């Protein structure tokens, strides 16, 4: 148990969030409100009813709840409301900069226009300035969809390039290696977009997938990715190339009781730029401050280690060096005052 670090300290710590799925921030009360607004029958009529459906014990059972929940998202205003509700919670967690994942194929595949999704989300990121948060969007491909679907999605997205800063890769990794999407990644990089990819914890062929993402596809960050500790050569590669790793303790705890905390500490010690994030906070029981505190509490992190995790989050974010300097100065001031 950490004696140095309190939940108040982790909540107030200035930080960047680099791994949060906007669809994973759909809280039961908003889900119910949108269902009623759009006359979508979700089979639940109270917040308690919705909460009872948020039950799962592995990736498959989680996705079986996660994707159907999105049916309540129908209009540009729905996507705005979803994003702005998250951004208010992020502000309460002293997130200063956030890069938000969104999954357009989860919506276009059910008849919602790409423009509806991105315009609603983007409008919320603009209004987030009033909350003193700098917010950007990262468009993810669903890896269990086809390469052709990814190609079409990127083609549809590029006219909106000024509204998002990079691409990612998420959903079910089994039999869906990063290289499946190598062409889309090359095209996105050529269009000036940043690159990241999920390499989920304890997957079949984890290390091979991490190798593909780092060595062949030139990703700048790995989302999750803590299995990299199994290969010292890849760990050295990540240190040398300043690759960011975005770990999510509370969602990890659904797969691994230790939250991959030992791996995070080992990577931190090796100088890997690992950061802490909330993933799907509405589903895994906590926003970013809770994730920092859960890790600090269970693994007795020192204040210096917690501050390093926050420092890494700014250093591996996709913002200008000047902006990073300003946020890091704010972080230093917070630490000096606490």
Image (cartoon, helix red, strand yellow):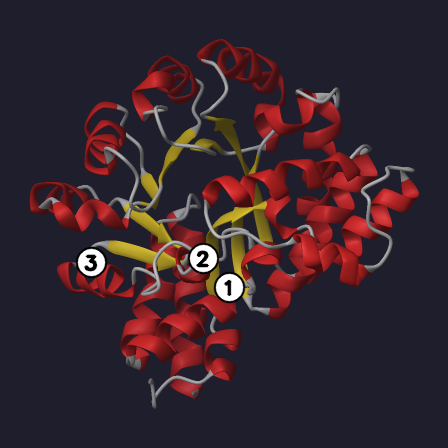
Residue in front for this viewpoint, 84 or 280:
280
**Label 3 packing within 10 angstroms: few (<14), some (14-19), many (20+):** many
**Relative to 262, is 333 above or below?**
below
Q: Residue at x 45, y 25 (%)?
A: 143
Q: CA distance from mark 3 to mark 1?
A: 20 Å
**Label 1 packing within 10 angstroms: few (<14), some (14-19), many (20+):** many
Residue in front for this viewpoint, 319 or 17:
17
Which residue corresponds to mark 1? 288
Disc 2 or 1, which lies upstream in sequence? 2
Give the position of the N terminus as an image quadrant. bottom left
| 69 relative to 104 in the view: left or right | right
Give coordinates of residue 63: x percent, y percent.
55, 40
**Label 2 packing within 10 angstroms: few (<14), some (14-19), many (20+):** many
Residue 129 visible? The answer is: no
| 231 relative to 280 in the view: left or right | left
**Relative to 196, is 228 above or below?**
below
Question: Residue 3 falls in which quadrant of the image?
Answer: bottom left
Which residue corresponds to mark 3? 267
Give coordinates of residue 53: x percent, y percent.
68, 52
**Relative to 203, is 45 above or below?**
below
| 58 relative to 36 in the view: left or right | left
Q: CA distance from mark 3 to mark 2?
A: 16 Å
Tags 2 and 1 in contact by the CB under 8 Å rule?
yes
Which residue corresponds to mark 2? 277
Q: Residue at x 30, y 48 (%)?
A: 244
Q: CA distance from mark 2 to mark 1?
A: 5 Å
Secondary structure found at label 3 = helix
Give coordinates of residue 257: x percent, y percent.
35, 64
Secondary structure found at label 2 = loop
Disc 3 or 2, which lies upstream in sequence? 3
Q: Residue at x 61, y 32 (%)?
A: 163
Give coordinates of residue 125: x percent, y percent.
66, 46
């Amino acid at each position: 148990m950490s004696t140095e670090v309190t939940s108040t300290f982790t909540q107030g710590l200035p930080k960047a969030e680099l791994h949060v799925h906007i669809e994973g921030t759909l809280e039961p009360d908003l889900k119910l409100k949108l269902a009623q607004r759009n006359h979508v029958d979700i089979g639940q009529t109270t917040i308690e009813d919705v909460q009872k459906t948020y039950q799962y014990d592995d990736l498959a059972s989680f996705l079986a709840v996660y994707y159907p929940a999105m049916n309540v998202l129908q209009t540009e205003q729905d996507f705005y409301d979803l994003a702005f509700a998250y951004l208010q919670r992020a502000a309460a967690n002293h997130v200063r900069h956030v890069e938000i994942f969104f999954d357009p194929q989860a919506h276009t595949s059910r008849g919602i226009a790409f423009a509806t999704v991105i315009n609603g989300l983007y409008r919320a990121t603009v209004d987030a300035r009033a909350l003193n948060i700098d917010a950007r969007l990262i468009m993810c491909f669903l890896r269990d969809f086809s390469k052709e679907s990814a190609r079409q999605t990127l083609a549809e997205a590029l006219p909106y390039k000024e509204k998002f800063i990079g691409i990612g890769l998420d959903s079910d990794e089994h039999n869906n290696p990063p290289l499946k999407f190598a062409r889309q990644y090359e095209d996105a990089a050529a269009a000036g977009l940043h690159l990241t990819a999920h390499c989920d914890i304890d997957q079949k062929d984890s290390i091979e997938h991490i190798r593909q993402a780092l060595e062949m596809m030139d990703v700048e960050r790995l989302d999750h990715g803590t299995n990299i500790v199994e290969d010292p050569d890849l760990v050295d590669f990540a240190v040398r190339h300043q690759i960011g790793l975005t770990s999510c303790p509370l969602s990890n705890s659904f797969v691994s009781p230790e939250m991959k905390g030992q791996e995070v500490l080992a990577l931190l010690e090796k100088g890997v730029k690992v950061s802490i994030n909330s993933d799907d906070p509405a589903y895994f029981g906590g926003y970013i401050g809770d994730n920092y505190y859960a890790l600090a509490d269970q693994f007795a992190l020192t204040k210096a280690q917690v501050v390093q995790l926050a420092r890494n989050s700014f250093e591996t974010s996709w913002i200008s060096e000047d902006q990073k300097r300003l946020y890091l100065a704010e972080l230093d001031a917070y630490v000096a005052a606490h």
